Amino acid sequence: MAEAPVSVIIPTFKRVDALRGTLNKLLQCDPAAAEILVHVDAGDQETPAMLAVEFPMVELICSDTRQGPGGGRNKLMNASGHETVISLDDDSWPICGDFMGVARHLIECHTSTAAIACHIVEQDSQPEPQQQESPEDSLTSTFSFVGCGAIIRRSAFLKTAGYLPLRYAYGMEEADVSLQLLNLGYQIKKSAALSVFHDCPRETHHRNPRINGAQITNTGLLAFLRYPVSQWPYGLMQVINRVRFAIRKRRLRGIISGIASIPATCWRYRRHHSPVKASTIRDLRRLKQEAEN
């Protein structure tokens, strides 16, 4: 089987069965990825043992202290050996077999693009019919991507501060990196013709009070760390809108703790404070409005 010069990165923690399924799917891609790297967070002894026996071709990175998914992705991006990096979760995989070759082509041809958000097919939903247009023709501008299905330009990512090593990074992780990339002058694209399946019960998952609370806390944290003071009112409105969204979805558990945790969390991560330009926030708002229309 031919290989495409791309790296696949996957952070994981005590999810042996999910990771095994994802790796088996990845090995069916043609062309195959030149390398697959997995980060195993501290405290997980089962996953390295499984990988050594069943997937010896996978490059394993282990941490002695808890890094969270963001900290794991930072280590994986640094260790990757190729410019084109496919970011996945331990329960997500490409649907189309030639995904790796197409990903490399898009990164090579669109030099001002730092990341390409894939179309995410959630669990219990039927994959949509294959798009008639090519992945390249389907590219449109967007404001962010998600780590469970994205193509990232490694050299662009390494110019950012990377991900914050949060245990529950929802609402912060890719939003933060995307904002940093936009501030550097890069574009972020999305492709409706490149699909990734995410085998996760999304609604049940996000009803977890810790995750629901983290979404609210991290919305405030992002505004504190990256928004200039002139844009803090916009950040406050985002926190309020996140709370409204949780109430509308009846995700009530975690709302109060999420709001209450904002000051302490901002103080804890204050050394990462590095605001982007006000014009970048204006561009972000414009891209969000375009995505909603």
Image (cartoon, helix red, strand yellow):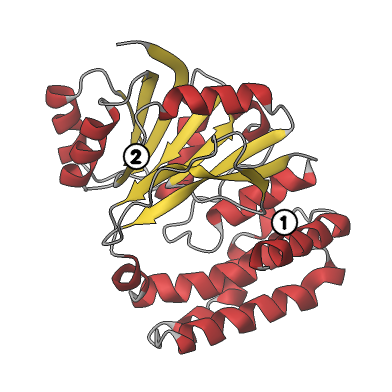
Question: For the view shown, which residue lies furthest in the front direction?
Answer: 132
Direction from residue 238 to residue 130 in the image, left or right: left
Q: Quadrant of residue 203?
A: bottom left
Numbered marks: total: 2
Residue 14: x and y in percent read 22, 48
Tell me, for residue 95, which label it has, or none: 2
In this view, the residue in front, 161 or 5, is 5
Residue at (33, 52) in percent of width and height: 127
Direction from residue 41 to residue 137 in the image, left or right: right
Q: Measured along the vertical axis of the image, is residue 187 above or below residue 112?
A: below
Q: CA distance from mark 2 to mark 1?
A: 38 Å
Q: Residues within 10 Å of mark 1 (few under 14, many from 20)?
A: some
Sequence-first disc among 2 and 1 = 2
Residue 7: x and y in percent read 45, 24
In this view, the residue in front, 85 or 138, is 138
- Which residue is identified by label 1? 273
Mark 2 or 1, closer to the camera: 2
Q: Quadrant of the C terminus?
A: bottom right
Residue 64: x and y in percent read 34, 39
Residue 190: x and y in percent read 59, 46
At mark 1, the secondary structure is loop
**Amino acid of disc 2:** Ile
Direction from residue 102 to residue 122 in the image, left or right: left
**Amino acid of disc 1:** His
Cβ–Cβ under 8 Å for marks 2 and 1: no
In this view, the residue in front, 108 or 180, is 108
Q: Measured along the vertical axis of the image, is residue 259 above or below residue 67?
A: below
Residue 45 visible in rendering:
no
